[in-house]
Amino acid sequence: MDIELIGRARRVGDDVNTDYIISSTRKRDTLDERVLGRYLFETLDPGFAASIRPGDVLVAGRNFGCGSAMEIAATVILAAGIRAVVASSFGRTFYRNAINNGLLPVECDTSSIGEGDELVIHVGEVEARVENRLTGRLTPARPLPAFMRDILESGGLAGYLRMHNGRLNI
């Protein structure tokens, strides 16, 4: 099944590491992602989390999610109401953590996407694209194999395994 999402672009830059996503000092207090979602990107912009609207799309440059392999970085983004991250490239571990937790990672050129632009994201196995409704620009994106889209549609790997009796069908 193909995935389609519509949301408002929220920009961050290049090399955003997992400690920028959620500060390690906050993780000492709790690992509850709903609580931590209030502190999303607080070291980059203390007001960022409060400005998120459900359905927003995070847009980044190169190497998003680099750094430590904290799974909580992907779940905090989801808990804040963001269902997709569009980036020029991702840290490898973050990319897999995103898929496994139901956060859609979309890889494409993000240089023409501005803060607040309305995006339509379409991800299939053969074709993927990001449409900017403000500019009308269609940007090709990296497609996802069917099994990854199935994991995302199931809300993550745990949901997928529950639905398929503990088997990964690839």
Image (cartoon, helix red, strand yellow):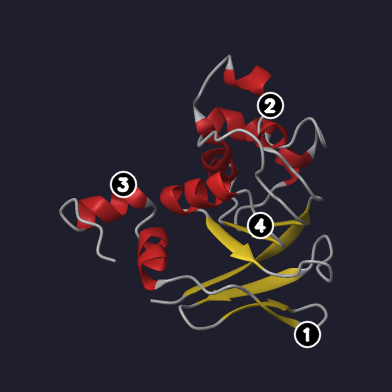
- Can you tell which quarter of the image residue 55 is in? bottom right
- Label 3 vs 2, first from the N-terminus: 2
Q: Which residue is mark 1?
A: 136
- Can you tell which quarter of the image residue 47 is in? top right
Q: Give how far apart the Cα atoms at labels 2 and 4 are.
A: 21 Å
- Up the image or down, 27 lies above or below 15; here it is above
Q: In which quadrant of the rendered image does the N terminus lie?
A: bottom left
- Label 1 vs 3, first from the N-terminus: 1
At numbered mark 3, what does the secondary structure look like: helix, strand or loop?
helix
- Up the image or down, 168 lies above or below 158; here it is below
Q: Which residue is mark 2?
A: 23
Residue kind at label 2, given as amino acid type: Ser
- The answer to whether mark 3 and mark 2 are in CB contact below 8 A is no
At numbered mark 2, what does the secondary structure look like: helix, strand or loop?
loop
- Label 4 vs 3, first from the N-terminus: 4
Residue kind at label 3, given as amino acid type: Ala
- Up the image or down, 30 lies above or below 59; here it is above
Q: Nearer the viewer, residue 7 or 148?
A: 148
Query: Left or right of 32: which side holds 22?
Result: right
Query: Left or right of 32: which side holds 45?
Result: right
Q: Which residue is mark 4?
A: 56
Residue kind at label 4, given as amino acid type: Asp
Mark identifier at residue 158: 3
Q: Nearer the viewer, residue 127 or 159?
A: 127
